[in-house]
Image (spheres, rainbow, N blue to C red):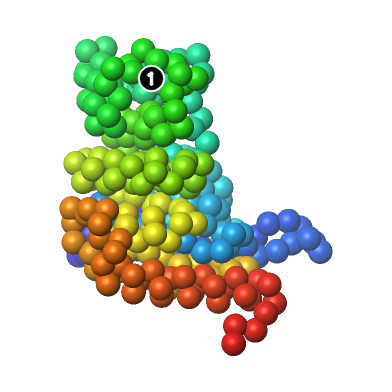
Amino acid sequence: MSTPSKVSIDAVGKVFGEGEREFLAIDRIDLEVPTNQFVSIVGTSGCGKSTLLNMVGGLAEPTFGDIRIDGRPVTGPGRDRGFVFQGYSLFEWLTVEGNIRFALEKSQLSKAEKAELVRHYVQAVGLMGFETAFPRQLSGGMRQRVAIARALVYRPSLLLMDEPFGALDAQTRGMMQELLLKVWEEHKVTVLFVTHDVDEAVFLADRVVVLASRPGRLKRDLAVPLDRPRRYDVVTSPEFTALKRTILADIREETLKVMALDPA
């Protein structure tokens, strides 16, 4: 018998509203994500990317269909899943160490084991020397490093990331992408990564999933044929450019549909 996927999404749909205001946001999406794979999800605004991520995370319930993690139905949030959002969601009254340690509050680990884990992830995200700094003393990129460390410190098997670098400037965003790949390659966790940035999606992922618009459906599922470990200069390669062109054409087609224009 074959091993089940880390994430199995089976004919999942989501309806919002009631009566005349009811609308179908996501319609029968099927998706299998193997263990330790990095999958980017892209599409037009309003196509249901974040809604799909929230359903996998147990923050929202599908109206129909099933979502399973390691073969078990998703019935709510769980410690097997870590979240990183665009907003840093840090506790302003806690230090870098305190914010990361907070994720271990319910852990049965000893105080020494928790301290070692926090130290390890502070180092993994390059924040040595800032352990006692408060969020207000950090740049946006540094805050997001804390958020990533906090999401990873209790060792979830699935990391859900919703536009985590969307608020950062271009230079910082590129550096954070490289940092995320470094951490992912070291710790190997399954990742679902929502983004509007096609370059980011292709650079990071093993696969890029393109959602159609209103309702959100699976339009295309593309393997990324780029070697790992991946360096940033890969963005100038013919393979990267060709894949980016295909994805941009898909998104443009969906955008024109939303705008009620003829793609021709």
* Three-letter amino acid code at the position of disc 1: Val
> Seen from this angle, which residue lies furthest right?
20
Q: Residue at x 49, y 46 (%)?
A: 166
Residue 134 image-quadrant placement: top left
Q: Residue at x 54, y 73 (%)?
A: 252
Q: Residue at x 50, y 67 (%)?
A: 211
Front-lying residue, 46 or 132: 132
> Seen from this angle, which residue lies furthest bottom?
264
Quadrant where the C terminus lies?
Answer: bottom right
Give the percent coordinates (x, y) of residue 67: 44, 56
SS assignment at label 1: helix
Residue 6 shows in this picture: no
Query: Mark 1, residues whose alpha carbon is within 10 Å: few (<14), some, or many (≥20)?
Result: many
Q: How many marks?
A: 1
Q: Residue at x 63, y 68 (%)?
A: 214
Question: Residue beneath label 1, please?
Answer: 96
14 above or below 188?
A: below
Give the percent coordinates (x, y) of residue 101: 35, 20
Residue 13 image-quadrant placement: bottom right
Q: Is residue 93 left or right of residue 255?
A: left
Quadrant where the N terminus lies?
Answer: bottom left
Give the percent coordinates (x, y) of residue 210: 45, 67
100 above or below 229?
A: above
Front-lying residue, 150 or 16: 150
Front-lying residue, 174 or 229: 174
Residue 138 shows in this picture: yes
